[in-house]
Image (tube, rainbow, N blue to C red):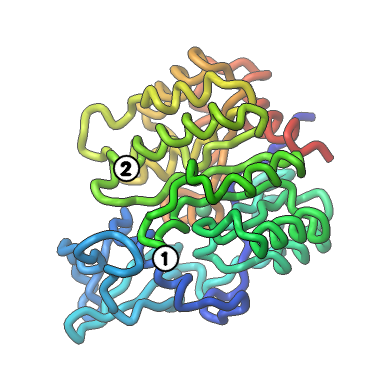
Protein backbone atom coordinates (compact mmCIF):
# COMPACT_ATOMS: atom_id res chain seq x y z
CA UNK A 1 0.00 0.00 0.00
CA UNK A 2 1.28 3.43 -0.84
CA UNK A 3 1.73 5.92 1.97
CA UNK A 4 -0.40 9.06 2.10
CA UNK A 5 1.82 11.78 3.54
CA UNK A 6 0.56 15.35 3.93
CA UNK A 7 3.30 17.96 3.36
CA UNK A 8 1.51 20.70 5.29
CA UNK A 9 -0.37 20.40 8.58
CA UNK A 10 -0.38 22.23 11.90
CA UNK A 11 -0.64 21.26 15.54
CA UNK A 12 -0.69 24.07 18.08
CA UNK A 13 -1.90 24.84 21.60
CA UNK A 14 -4.65 27.47 22.16
CA UNK A 15 -3.02 30.44 20.43
CA UNK A 16 -4.07 33.10 22.92
CA UNK A 17 -2.36 31.29 25.79
CA UNK A 18 1.13 32.52 24.87
CA UNK A 19 2.63 29.15 25.80
CA UNK A 20 5.71 29.77 23.65
CA UNK A 21 6.36 33.37 24.81
CA UNK A 22 7.14 36.47 22.70
CA UNK A 23 3.43 37.07 22.13
CA UNK A 24 3.76 40.73 21.10
CA UNK A 25 6.38 39.92 18.46
CA UNK A 26 4.44 36.92 17.18
CA UNK A 27 1.25 38.95 16.86
CA UNK A 28 3.15 41.66 14.99
CA UNK A 29 4.43 39.10 12.49
CA UNK A 30 0.95 37.61 12.11
CA UNK A 31 -0.58 41.05 11.56
CA UNK A 32 1.91 41.62 8.75
CA UNK A 33 1.24 38.16 7.31
CA UNK A 34 -2.56 38.58 7.14
CA UNK A 35 -2.77 42.23 6.15
CA UNK A 36 -3.84 41.27 2.60
CA UNK A 37 -5.41 37.92 3.56
CA UNK A 38 -7.84 36.42 1.08
CA UNK A 39 -10.44 36.03 3.83
CA UNK A 40 -10.75 39.82 4.03
CA UNK A 41 -11.49 42.15 6.91
CA UNK A 42 -14.94 42.51 8.50
CA UNK A 43 -16.40 45.17 10.78
CA UNK A 44 -17.58 43.09 13.72
CA UNK A 45 -20.69 45.16 14.57
CA UNK A 46 -22.48 44.25 11.33
CA UNK A 47 -20.07 41.80 9.64
CA UNK A 48 -19.65 44.33 6.79
CA UNK A 49 -16.76 43.73 4.40
CA UNK A 50 -14.03 46.37 4.77
CA UNK A 51 -11.97 46.94 1.65
CA UNK A 52 -9.76 49.71 3.05
CA UNK A 53 -6.36 48.16 3.90
CA UNK A 54 -6.49 49.17 7.56
CA UNK A 55 -3.75 46.76 8.71
CA UNK A 56 -1.19 48.21 6.31
CA UNK A 57 1.42 50.70 7.48
CA UNK A 58 3.17 53.39 5.46
CA UNK A 59 6.02 50.97 4.74
CA UNK A 60 6.52 47.25 5.44
CA UNK A 61 8.19 45.97 8.59
CA UNK A 62 7.89 46.11 12.34
CA UNK A 63 8.82 49.82 12.48
CA UNK A 64 5.87 50.84 10.33
CA UNK A 65 3.09 48.64 11.61
CA UNK A 66 -0.12 50.36 12.72
CA UNK A 67 -1.05 49.71 16.36
CA UNK A 68 -4.54 48.23 16.22
CA UNK A 69 -4.59 46.08 19.38
CA UNK A 70 -4.24 43.02 17.15
CA UNK A 71 -5.05 39.80 19.03
CA UNK A 72 -6.33 36.22 18.85
CA UNK A 73 -10.08 35.89 19.26
CA UNK A 74 -12.07 32.65 19.29
CA UNK A 75 -13.91 30.64 16.62
CA UNK A 76 -11.04 31.09 14.19
CA UNK A 77 -10.97 34.88 14.33
CA UNK A 78 -8.19 37.44 14.59
CA UNK A 79 -9.49 40.62 16.20
CA UNK A 80 -8.37 44.25 16.18
CA UNK A 81 -9.59 47.81 16.56
CA UNK A 82 -9.64 50.57 13.97
CA UNK A 83 -10.89 54.06 14.81
CA UNK A 84 -12.58 52.70 17.93
CA UNK A 85 -14.47 49.98 16.02
CA UNK A 86 -13.95 46.22 16.49
CA UNK A 87 -12.86 44.41 13.33
CA UNK A 88 -11.85 40.83 12.58
CA UNK A 89 -10.52 38.41 9.99
CA UNK A 90 -12.01 34.90 9.84
CA UNK A 91 -8.48 33.51 9.60
CA UNK A 92 -9.23 29.90 10.60
CA UNK A 93 -12.47 27.97 10.13
CA UNK A 94 -15.10 28.93 12.75
CA UNK A 95 -14.92 25.36 14.10
CA UNK A 96 -11.60 26.27 15.77
CA UNK A 97 -13.50 27.61 18.76
CA UNK A 98 -10.53 27.83 21.15
CA UNK A 99 -7.89 28.43 18.44
CA UNK A 100 -6.11 25.15 19.14
CA UNK A 101 -5.19 22.22 16.94
CA UNK A 102 -4.13 19.45 19.31
CA UNK A 103 -2.33 16.37 18.01
CA UNK A 104 -5.29 14.13 18.88
CA UNK A 105 -7.55 16.30 16.69
CA UNK A 106 -5.19 16.17 13.70
CA UNK A 107 -4.65 12.41 14.12
CA UNK A 108 -8.43 11.84 14.29
CA UNK A 109 -8.79 13.83 11.06
CA UNK A 110 -5.91 11.93 9.43
CA UNK A 111 -7.52 8.62 10.39
CA UNK A 112 -10.88 9.74 9.01
CA UNK A 113 -9.44 10.96 5.72
CA UNK A 114 -6.91 8.15 5.30
CA UNK A 115 -3.68 10.07 5.81
CA UNK A 116 -0.83 8.06 7.29
CA UNK A 117 1.68 10.77 8.09
CA UNK A 118 1.90 14.56 8.14
CA UNK A 119 4.69 17.12 8.12
CA UNK A 120 4.06 19.78 10.78
CA UNK A 121 5.16 23.17 9.51
CA UNK A 122 6.66 25.27 12.29
CA UNK A 123 5.63 28.77 11.45
CA UNK A 124 6.17 31.23 14.29
CA UNK A 125 2.70 32.70 13.84
CA UNK A 126 1.55 29.51 15.63
CA UNK A 127 4.17 29.88 18.34
CA UNK A 128 7.55 28.64 19.49
CA UNK A 129 6.54 25.00 19.34
CA UNK A 130 9.87 23.21 19.88
CA UNK A 131 8.74 21.27 22.96
CA UNK A 132 5.08 21.06 21.92
CA UNK A 133 6.13 19.31 18.68
CA UNK A 134 8.37 16.90 20.62
CA UNK A 135 5.30 15.89 22.63
CA UNK A 136 3.27 15.37 19.42
CA UNK A 137 6.01 13.04 18.13
CA UNK A 138 6.17 11.16 21.43
CA UNK A 139 2.43 10.60 21.63
CA UNK A 140 1.91 9.55 18.03
CA UNK A 141 5.02 7.71 16.84
CA UNK A 142 5.25 7.48 13.06
CA UNK A 143 2.38 9.87 12.38
CA UNK A 144 4.22 13.19 12.35
CA UNK A 145 7.44 14.62 10.98
CA UNK A 146 8.27 18.04 12.40
CA UNK A 147 10.17 21.06 11.15
CA UNK A 148 12.49 22.98 13.45
CA UNK A 149 12.23 26.76 13.73
CA UNK A 150 14.75 29.53 14.25
CA UNK A 151 14.29 33.30 14.50
CA UNK A 152 15.10 33.71 10.81
CA UNK A 153 16.26 37.33 10.98
CA UNK A 154 19.10 36.30 13.30
CA UNK A 155 19.28 32.65 12.25
CA UNK A 156 23.08 32.55 12.10
CA UNK A 157 23.60 33.62 15.72
CA UNK A 158 24.87 31.07 18.25
CA UNK A 159 21.65 30.89 20.28
CA UNK A 160 19.65 30.10 17.11
CA UNK A 161 22.17 27.46 16.05
CA UNK A 162 21.91 25.90 19.52
CA UNK A 163 18.14 25.98 19.27
CA UNK A 164 18.23 24.18 15.92
CA UNK A 165 20.64 21.56 17.26
CA UNK A 166 18.42 20.94 20.29
CA UNK A 167 15.30 20.56 18.13
CA UNK A 168 17.00 18.08 15.82
CA UNK A 169 19.16 16.13 18.25
CA UNK A 170 16.95 16.11 21.36
CA UNK A 171 13.40 16.88 20.26
CA UNK A 172 13.13 14.77 17.10
CA UNK A 173 12.77 17.48 14.42
CA UNK A 174 13.69 16.21 10.94
CA UNK A 175 13.97 19.42 8.91
CA UNK A 176 14.27 23.18 9.17
CA UNK A 177 11.11 25.14 8.39
CA UNK A 178 12.29 28.54 7.20
CA UNK A 179 9.81 31.38 6.73
CA UNK A 180 11.09 34.64 5.28
CA UNK A 181 8.11 36.27 7.02
CA UNK A 182 10.48 36.34 9.99
CA UNK A 183 12.50 39.08 8.30
CA UNK A 184 9.59 41.36 9.26
CA UNK A 185 11.32 41.75 12.63
CA UNK A 186 14.21 43.76 11.18
CA UNK A 187 12.21 45.57 8.50
CA UNK A 188 13.34 43.03 5.85
CA UNK A 189 16.96 44.08 6.05
CA UNK A 190 18.00 40.41 5.97
CA UNK A 191 17.55 38.05 3.03
CA UNK A 192 18.27 34.35 2.59
CA UNK A 193 21.61 35.13 0.90
CA UNK A 194 22.75 37.41 3.71
CA UNK A 195 26.25 36.62 4.91
CA UNK A 196 24.97 36.50 8.52
CA UNK A 197 22.95 33.35 7.75
CA UNK A 198 25.87 31.35 6.41
CA UNK A 199 26.47 29.55 9.77
CA UNK A 200 22.84 28.38 9.72
CA UNK A 201 23.11 26.85 6.26
CA UNK A 202 26.40 25.22 7.22
CA UNK A 203 24.77 23.69 10.29
CA UNK A 204 21.84 22.45 8.21
CA UNK A 205 24.36 20.79 5.90
CA UNK A 206 26.16 19.18 8.84
CA UNK A 207 22.90 17.92 10.34
CA UNK A 208 21.92 16.52 6.92
CA UNK A 209 18.34 17.81 7.14
CA UNK A 210 16.11 19.26 4.41
CA UNK A 211 14.75 22.82 4.47
CA UNK A 212 11.06 23.52 3.90
CA UNK A 213 10.94 27.09 2.57
CA UNK A 214 8.09 29.53 2.93
CA UNK A 215 8.88 32.61 0.82
CA UNK A 216 6.26 34.91 2.35
CA UNK A 217 7.99 38.20 3.16
CA UNK A 218 5.05 39.87 1.37
CA UNK A 219 6.76 43.21 0.99
CA UNK A 220 4.75 45.47 -1.30
CA UNK A 221 4.07 44.98 -4.17
CA UNK A 222 3.47 41.46 -2.89
CA UNK A 223 3.04 39.58 -6.20
CA UNK A 224 6.37 40.89 -7.51
CA UNK A 225 7.98 40.30 -4.15
CA UNK A 226 7.16 36.58 -4.35
CA UNK A 227 9.04 36.39 -7.66
CA UNK A 228 11.94 38.38 -6.14
CA UNK A 229 12.09 35.85 -3.30
CA UNK A 230 12.10 32.94 -5.76
CA UNK A 231 15.03 34.55 -7.55
CA UNK A 232 16.87 34.80 -4.25
CA UNK A 233 16.13 31.13 -3.57
CA UNK A 234 17.70 30.24 -6.92
CA UNK A 235 20.77 32.19 -5.92
CA UNK A 236 20.77 30.37 -2.57
CA UNK A 237 20.38 27.01 -4.34
CA UNK A 238 23.43 27.81 -6.48
CA UNK A 239 25.44 28.24 -3.29
CA UNK A 240 24.05 25.18 -1.45
CA UNK A 241 23.35 22.51 -4.06
CA UNK A 242 23.67 19.69 -1.53
CA UNK A 243 20.77 20.72 0.74
CA UNK A 244 17.45 19.03 -0.03
CA UNK A 245 14.64 21.58 -0.21
CA UNK A 246 10.86 21.77 -0.37
CA UNK A 247 9.19 24.94 -1.62
CA UNK A 248 6.01 25.10 0.47
CA UNK A 249 2.65 26.76 -0.28
CA UNK A 250 2.87 26.16 -4.04
CA UNK A 251 1.96 27.91 -6.22
CA UNK A 252 1.50 31.21 -4.39
CA UNK A 253 1.26 33.20 -7.63
CA UNK A 254 -2.19 31.66 -8.22
CA UNK A 255 -3.36 33.59 -5.16
CA UNK A 256 -1.11 36.65 -5.49
CA UNK A 257 -1.98 37.22 -9.15
CA UNK A 258 -5.72 36.74 -8.64
CA UNK A 259 -7.61 38.62 -11.34
CA UNK A 260 -4.81 38.23 -13.88
CA UNK A 261 -5.34 35.80 -16.79
CA UNK A 262 -1.79 34.57 -16.13
CA UNK A 263 -2.34 33.59 -12.52
CA UNK A 264 -2.10 29.85 -13.35
CA UNK A 265 1.31 30.14 -15.02
CA UNK A 266 4.39 28.33 -13.73
CA UNK A 267 6.83 31.19 -13.05
CA UNK A 268 10.24 30.52 -14.66
CA UNK A 269 11.80 31.13 -11.24
CA UNK A 270 9.91 28.09 -9.90
CA UNK A 271 10.80 26.07 -13.00
CA UNK A 272 14.49 26.73 -12.41
CA UNK A 273 14.17 25.55 -8.80
CA UNK A 274 12.36 22.34 -9.77
CA UNK A 275 14.94 21.56 -12.43
CA UNK A 276 17.54 21.20 -9.68
CA UNK A 277 18.38 17.92 -7.96
CA UNK A 278 16.90 17.74 -4.48
CA UNK A 279 14.25 20.46 -4.97
CA UNK A 280 10.55 19.70 -4.49
CA UNK A 281 7.34 21.71 -4.31
CA UNK A 282 4.32 21.37 -2.08
CA UNK A 283 1.05 21.72 -4.00
CA UNK A 284 -1.59 23.51 -1.92
CA UNK A 285 -3.56 24.45 -5.00
CA UNK A 286 -7.02 24.20 -3.40
CA UNK A 287 -6.21 27.17 -1.13
CA UNK A 288 -4.37 29.19 -3.74
CA UNK A 289 -7.58 29.17 -5.79
CA UNK A 290 -9.87 29.58 -2.77
CA UNK A 291 -11.89 32.17 -4.72
CA UNK A 292 -13.02 29.48 -7.19
CA UNK A 293 -16.36 27.86 -6.33
CA UNK A 294 -15.00 24.36 -5.69
CA UNK A 295 -11.25 24.38 -6.32
CA UNK A 296 -10.72 20.59 -6.51
CA UNK A 297 -12.80 20.53 -9.72
CA UNK A 298 -11.12 23.56 -11.34
CA UNK A 299 -9.81 22.77 -14.79
CA UNK A 300 -7.11 25.43 -14.40
CA UNK A 301 -5.67 23.55 -11.42
CA UNK A 302 -5.80 20.26 -13.29
CA UNK A 303 -3.81 21.89 -16.08
CA UNK A 304 -1.24 23.22 -13.61
CA UNK A 305 -0.69 19.67 -12.32
CA UNK A 306 -0.41 18.32 -15.86
CA UNK A 307 2.17 20.93 -16.84
CA UNK A 308 4.23 20.37 -13.70
CA UNK A 309 4.24 16.59 -14.14
CA UNK A 310 5.09 16.86 -17.84
CA UNK A 311 7.89 19.38 -17.30
CA UNK A 312 9.47 18.31 -14.02
CA UNK A 313 8.15 14.83 -13.25
CA UNK A 314 5.85 13.70 -10.45
CA UNK A 315 8.80 12.95 -8.19
CA UNK A 316 9.30 16.61 -7.31
CA UNK A 317 5.68 17.31 -6.28
CA UNK A 318 4.00 16.84 -2.89
CA UNK A 319 0.35 17.28 -1.90
CA UNK A 320 -0.10 19.54 1.13
CA UNK A 321 -3.46 20.26 2.78
CA UNK A 322 -2.80 23.07 5.30
CA UNK A 323 -4.97 21.33 7.88
CA UNK A 324 -6.74 22.82 9.87
CA UNK A 325 -6.72 26.13 7.89
CA UNK A 326 -7.93 24.22 4.80
CA UNK A 327 -11.37 23.66 6.30
CA UNK A 328 -12.47 27.26 5.78
CA UNK A 329 -12.40 26.45 2.03
CA UNK A 330 -12.78 22.67 1.54
CA UNK A 331 -12.72 19.77 4.00
CA UNK A 332 -9.53 17.85 4.66
CA UNK A 333 -10.99 14.96 2.67
CA UNK A 334 -11.81 17.23 -0.28
CA UNK A 335 -8.26 18.61 -0.37
CA UNK A 336 -7.21 15.26 -1.90
CA UNK A 337 -9.86 15.21 -4.64
CA UNK A 338 -7.85 17.10 -7.26
CA UNK A 339 -5.23 14.35 -7.30
CA UNK A 340 -7.42 11.37 -6.33
CA UNK A 341 -10.14 11.75 -8.97
CA UNK A 342 -9.59 14.79 -11.20
CA UNK A 343 -6.15 14.25 -12.71
CA UNK A 344 -6.92 11.16 -14.76
CA UNK A 345 -3.70 11.68 -16.75
CA UNK A 346 -1.66 10.64 -13.69
CA UNK A 347 -0.45 7.06 -13.61
CA UNK A 348 -0.94 5.21 -10.31
CA UNK A 349 2.78 5.59 -9.64
CA UNK A 350 2.68 9.35 -10.26
CA UNK A 351 -0.43 9.78 -8.09
CA UNK A 352 1.09 7.80 -5.23
CA UNK A 353 4.36 9.71 -5.44
CA UNK A 354 2.58 13.09 -5.17
CA UNK A 355 0.26 11.95 -2.38
CA UNK A 356 3.04 10.67 -0.17
CA UNK A 357 5.73 8.57 -1.79
CA UNK A 358 8.02 11.53 -2.40
CA UNK A 359 7.86 12.73 1.20
CA UNK A 360 8.23 9.18 2.48
CA UNK A 361 11.49 9.00 0.54
CA UNK A 362 12.72 12.11 2.38
CA UNK A 363 11.51 10.91 5.78
CA UNK A 364 11.49 7.10 5.80
CA UNK A 365 10.08 5.43 8.90
ZN1 LIG B 1 -0.18 26.41 7.01
In-image side of 70 versus 25 (left or right): left
In-image side of 44 versus 323 (left or right): left
Does the image show residue 56?
yes
Question: In the rendered image of this protein, does residue 278 appear above or below residue 8?
Answer: above
Q: Is mark 1 within 8 Å of ligand 1?
A: no
Badge 1 marks a residue whose secondary structure is: helix
Task: From the image, tell me which residue sits under label 2.
Answer: 225
Q: What residue occupies the far bottom of the structure in this picture?
A: 84
Does the image show residue 344?
no
Q: In this rendering, which labeled residue sits more in front, label 2 or label 1? A: 2
Badge 2 marks a residue whose secondary structure is: helix
How far apart, in angstroms, are the residues tagged by discs 2 and 1? 18 Å
The residue located at (46%, 22%) in the rendering is 272
In-image side of 267 versus 356 (left or right): left
Q: Position of residue 212 (x, y in %)?
A: 59, 43
Question: In the rendered image of this protein, does residue 149 appear above or below residue 224?
Answer: below
Task: From the image, tell me which residue sits under label 1.
Answer: 30
Observer-nearest of 89 and 53: 53
Q: Position of residue 68 (x, y in %)?
A: 28, 79
Question: In the rendered image of this protein, does residue 151 appear above or below residue 78?
Answer: above
The residue located at (44%, 41%) in the rendering is 286
Observer-nearest of 228 and 94: 228
In the rendered structure, find residue 217 and report the number of the disc placed on it.
Answer: none
Amino acid sequence: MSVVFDAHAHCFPPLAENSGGMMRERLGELQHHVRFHGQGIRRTRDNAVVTKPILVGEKDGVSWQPDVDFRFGSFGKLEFKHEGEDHHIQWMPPTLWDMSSPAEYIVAQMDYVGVDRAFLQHDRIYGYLDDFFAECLRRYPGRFVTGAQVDEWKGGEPDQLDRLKRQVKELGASALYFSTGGFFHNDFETGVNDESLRPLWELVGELGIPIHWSPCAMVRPIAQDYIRELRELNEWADAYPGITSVLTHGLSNIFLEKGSPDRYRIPPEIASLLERDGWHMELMLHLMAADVEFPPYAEDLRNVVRTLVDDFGAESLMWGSDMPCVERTVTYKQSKILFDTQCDFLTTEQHDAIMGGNLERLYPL
